[in-house]
């Protein structure tokens, strides 16, 4: 497949993107605009859109869970890419997660049904809806078992959309990304930084499998899913063909940046205890805890998925192998001044 031609959306089509100023959304918006599509994007009034000011985008300012904002943004659009998400922050309430994930999905789907020529709703969920994987790898049919409010509301939104779209005869595709990374992302920056320390900590006894998807691959998949006939009504776990261990991630980063790699295995329970204590203190004050249980769990669980469906149904082969993507991202972090090479 020619990855430069992932979009088969007819030129001049009208597309709506939520979460357009975020990491994934901004990459997607740029690709859609360059493909000759008419792009409308929803952004909060506080969002900085300067990184996309070179593009011809119609911005609608407001919240994704405001009915009037969505009614205006979705008017006469052919495709919707729902990327907006509420990420885990101490200051967010359960209602915030519900509004951004569930209510926004309901408003968007209802608005889409008002468009007689609407083509497809591309909904971004998460592999987190599956929760803990007892015997990895898991595929798209694995049971839902969300473990926190982020995952719970993501699962609720996905389940609601599937039922609504099936009942209304609306075309849709669900995208469940694994860990999204690439130049510009900060969510994995801490792991990359750890690879430059004198010792690389490994918590607990597990290998700690982690499944990655490069943002360039993820956005290509989204665009392909918008028109592929076999994607309608389907969910796709979006990740590389195989997972990578946290240890291997650290080794690749250290090698790329010229640092010695010295992994050290430590017991996990003291870190879980510290995480619980920090959350107990910080949450009532609506402060972001320096360490919290979910962050510790990141270094102790195995998350591995079977991504066969992505290749079998969409015919998609990832551009970035785990090692290539990790090395590229490490170099980009250096260029951005977030890491130092030796």
Image (spheres, rainbow, N blue to C red):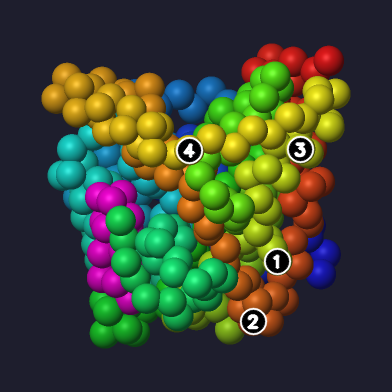
User: Tag 3 or tag 1, which sits nearer the N-term?
Assistant: 1
In the image, what residue occupies the spot 40% across and 32% down? 271
Distance CA(mark 1)–CA(mark 3): 20 Å
Which of the 4 image quarters holds residue 199? top right
Tell which of 334 and 245 is nearer to you: 245
Judge whether 239 appears above or below 19 on screen.
Answer: below
Residue under label 1, please give it.
Answer: 241
Which of the 4 image quarters holds residue 243? bottom right
In the image, what residue occupies the spot 38% across and 61% down? 131
Residue 7 in sight from this viewpoint: no
Distance CA(mark 4)–CA(mark 2): 42 Å
Residue 160 magenta-drawn? yes
Mark in front: 4 vs 1: 4
Distance CA(mark 4)–CA(mark 1): 30 Å
Residue under label 3, please give it.
Answer: 251
Mark seen at residue 267: 4
User: Tag 1 or tag 2, which sits nearer the N-term?
Assistant: 1
Q: Are marks 4 and 1 in contact (CB under 8 Å)?
A: no
Mark seen at residue 313: 2
Label 3 crowd bin: few (<14), some (14–19), many (20+), radius 10 Å: many
In the image, what residue occupies the spot 69% across and 14% down? 337
User: Tag 1 or tag 4, which sits nearer the N-term?
Assistant: 1
């Amino acid at each position: 497949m020619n990855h430069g031609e992932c979009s088969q959306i007819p030129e001049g089509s009208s597309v709506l993107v939520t979460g357009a100023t975020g990491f994934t959304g901004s990459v997607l918006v740029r690709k859609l605009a360059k493909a000759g599509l008419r792009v409308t994007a929803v952004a909060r009034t506080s969002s900085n859109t300067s990184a996309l000011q070179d593009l011809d985008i119609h911005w609608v300012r407001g919240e994704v869970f405001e009915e009037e904002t969505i009614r205006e943004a979705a008017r006469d659009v052919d495709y919707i890419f729902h990327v907006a998400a509420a990420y885990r922050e101490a200051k967010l309430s359960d209602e915030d997660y519900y509004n951004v994930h569930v209510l926004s999905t309901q408003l968007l789907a209802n608005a889409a049904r008002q468009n007689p020529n609407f083509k497809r709703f591309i909904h971004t969920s998460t592999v987190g809806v599956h929760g803990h994987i007892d015997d990895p790898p898991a595929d798209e049919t694995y049971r839902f078992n969300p473990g926190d409010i982020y995952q719970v509301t993501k699962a609720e939104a996905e389940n609601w959309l599937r039922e609504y779209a099936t009942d209304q005869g609306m075309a849709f595709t669900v995208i469940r990304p694994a860990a999204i990374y690439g130049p510009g992302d900060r969510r994995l920056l801490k792991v990359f930084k750890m690879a430059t320390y004198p010792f690389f900590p490994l918590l607990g006894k597990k290998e700690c499998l982690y499944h990655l998807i490069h943002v360039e691959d993820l956005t290509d998949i989204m665009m392909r899913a918008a028109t592929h006939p076999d994607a309608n009504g389907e969910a796709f776990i979006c990740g590389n063909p195989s997972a990578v261990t946290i240890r291997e991630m650290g080794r690749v980063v250290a090698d790329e940046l010229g640092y010695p790699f010295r992994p050290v295995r430590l017991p996990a329970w003291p870190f879980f205890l510290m995480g619980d204590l920090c959350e107990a203190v910080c949450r009532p004050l609506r402060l972001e805890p320096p360490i919290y249980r979910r962050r510790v769990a990141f270094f102790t669980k195995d998350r591995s998925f079977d991504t066969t469906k992505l290749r079998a149904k969409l015919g998609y082969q990832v551009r970035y192998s785990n090692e290539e993507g990790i090395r590229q991202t490490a170099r980009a972090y250096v260029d951005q001044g977030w890491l130092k090479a030796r």
